[in-house]
Image: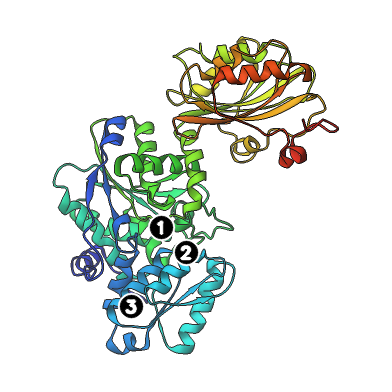
Amino acid sequence: MKKHLQPEDYLKKILTARVYDVAVESALEPARNLSRRLHNKVLLKREDQQPVFSFKLRGAYNKMAHLTPEQLQRGVICASAGNHAQGVALAAHKMGARAVIVMPITTPQVKVEAVKALGGEVVLHGDSYSDAAEHANALCERDQLTFVHPFDDPDVIAGQGTIAMEILRQHQGPLDAVFVAIGGGGLISGVASYIKSVRPEVKVIGVQMSDSDAMARSVAARKRVTLGDVGLFSDGTAVKLVGEETFRIASQLVDEFMLVDTDAVCAAIKDVFVDTRSIVEPAGALAVAAIKQYVAEHRTRGETYAAILCGANMNFDRLRFVAERAEVGEEREALFAVTIPEERGSFRRFCELIGTLPGGPRNVTEFNYRISDAQQAHVFVGLTTHGKGESARIAANFTRHGFEALDLTHDELAKEHIRHMVGGPSPLAGDERLLRFIFPERPGALMKFLSNMRPNWNISLFHYRNQGADYGRILVGLQVPKSEDKAFQAFLDALGYPCVEETGNPVYRLFLRAPGASAG
C-alpha cells in the first residue's frame, strides 16, 4: 500500500526544494488602491514576474532536480498547452536535458513558439488536453522518457510550496488568509502544506471559476469528481479532474473554497493593473477576485490578505473582452433595455432624465438605437454606477418616469451578444443620412448636439460606446429632408465636431440602410 506523505514530510521537502536555479524570489507587494477601497490590507505575490511569467517553473524544476543522471539523459516529457509547458522547457534547457512537450493542435501559436524558444520539442496532437496527455503517456513509454506531471507529484507540489515559504518570510506581521487559484491543485497543496505546518492560524482559501470547480465539488463529495466540461476563459485552471495527491491534501488542509465568475475575474484583472500596471491572465486574477468577494460577504475591516498572482500569459486579443466585462463585473456599469415613445423630443427627454438620476449624474457608457417601430423605440443603454446594486433602482426610476426599462446588467446574452447586434435595415428610415462623429468626452456634449438640431430632424440610429479616451466615436442616423441640405450643413459647421458622412458606404447599404432608400 502506498504510504502518503505527511505534513512534516512536505515541510522538509519544501525547505529543501531546488527552485532558485531558474525561479526568482518574487516580490510581495501591497496593492494600495485595492486595500484602500476594501478597507483591508491586500498583498500581491508577484509570480507573474517569473522568467516564464508563471509559478509553474518551480515545481517542474524541482521535479527534474530529483531525477537521476540516467533519467535526465533520456529526457522528460509533459502534456500542456500553457504555463507548465514553458516551465518544463526552461528547466530542461537549464539542465541540458531533452524536453518533449505534447500540446493540443488547438494551442495558440504564440504559446507553441514560446516553448520552442526555450528549446522544447513540440509535438502537436489532438484537440484537447486529454488527447495530448494520452499521446504523451504513449511517447513516454515508447522512448523511456520521464513524465513531469503538472500538479499530481510530491516534488512538483513541494516546488510550488516555496511560494508560501517566501510569503511568510517576506511578511512578518499579521496575516489572516492566503488566497490561491486552483486548477489541478498543485499550487494550493504546496501552499497549504507549508502554511499549516508553520502558521496554522492563517487561513488557506482556494479559488476556482464557477464553471471549472472540480476541486470544490470533489471535496464536497469526499471523492474525486470528473467534470463533463469546463469553462475555458481561465484556461490556466480549466481542469476536469484534480490529482489524487492534491485532492487528499486539499481535503485535509484547505479552510475554504470560493467560486468566482468571469465578470468578477475581469474586474480583478483591472484592479491588478491599476495597482501594478501589469496585466495578469485570468487564472492570475482569481485570488484577487475572491478577496473582494470575501470582504463583501464577511464585511471585514483591518485584516491582511495575500493573493498569489500565479500567471501573466495573457493572449493580447482577449484584452478587449476583459476591458468590456470589467466594468460590469465591478458593477461600475449597468446595462438596460429602455422603451421610449417614437415621437419627436422623447430621445432628448430621456437624456435629460439620465442627467437627473438620484445619486448624481451618470456617464453614458453605451447607447445603441435603431428606428424599427412607428410607436415605440427600444434603446440599449449603458450607464456608470456608484456601487453595487444600483441597476435595479435605476431601472425602476426610468419606469416611474414613463420609460419602461429592463435591467440587463446580469444578462449573459445581452452582455456578450445583443449589445453588438442592435440595428438592421428599417423601412421607417427614409431620408436617412449616416454620419460618424468624434465627440469630446465631457458633460453636455450630447445635449449640445440635440439642442442645435431642427425639430423636424429625427434621430433614426444612434451607436456610442465609451472607449476610455478623452473623445468618443458616435454613429448617428438622421432623417433630414432633401430640401434642408444647406441647413443641415450649417448645423454641422456650427457644431464643430469632426464628422465623416457614411451614407454612401457599401457596408451601410448592406446592413443598415432601408430597402429602396437613396444612397444620397
Dot 2 or dot 3: first in sequence order is: 3
Q: Residue at x 56, y 12 (%)?
A: 353
Mark 2 vs mark 3, foreground winner is: 2
- Could you tell me the amino acid type at mark 2? Val
Q: Nearer the viewer, residue 518 or 136?
A: 518
Q: Which residue is mark 3?
A: 92
Relative to 80, 493 lies left or right: right
Q: CA distance from mark 2 to mark 3?
A: 20 Å
Relative to 445, 195 lies left or right: left
Spot occupied by residue 252 in the image (x, y as percentages of width and height): 34, 56
Q: CA distance from mark 1 to mark 3?
A: 20 Å
Relative to 85, 499 lies left or right: right
Q: Residue at x 21, y 59 (%)?
A: 25
Q: Callout 3 environment at 10 Å: few (<14), some (14 to 19), or many (20+)?
A: many
- Could you tell me the amino acid type at mark 1? Asn
Q: Which residue is mark 2?
A: 110
Residue furthest right as drawn: 516
Q: Which residue is mark 1?
A: 313
Spot occupied by residue 321 in the image (x, y as percentages of width and height): 52, 44
Q: Residue at x 28, y 88 (%)?
A: 69
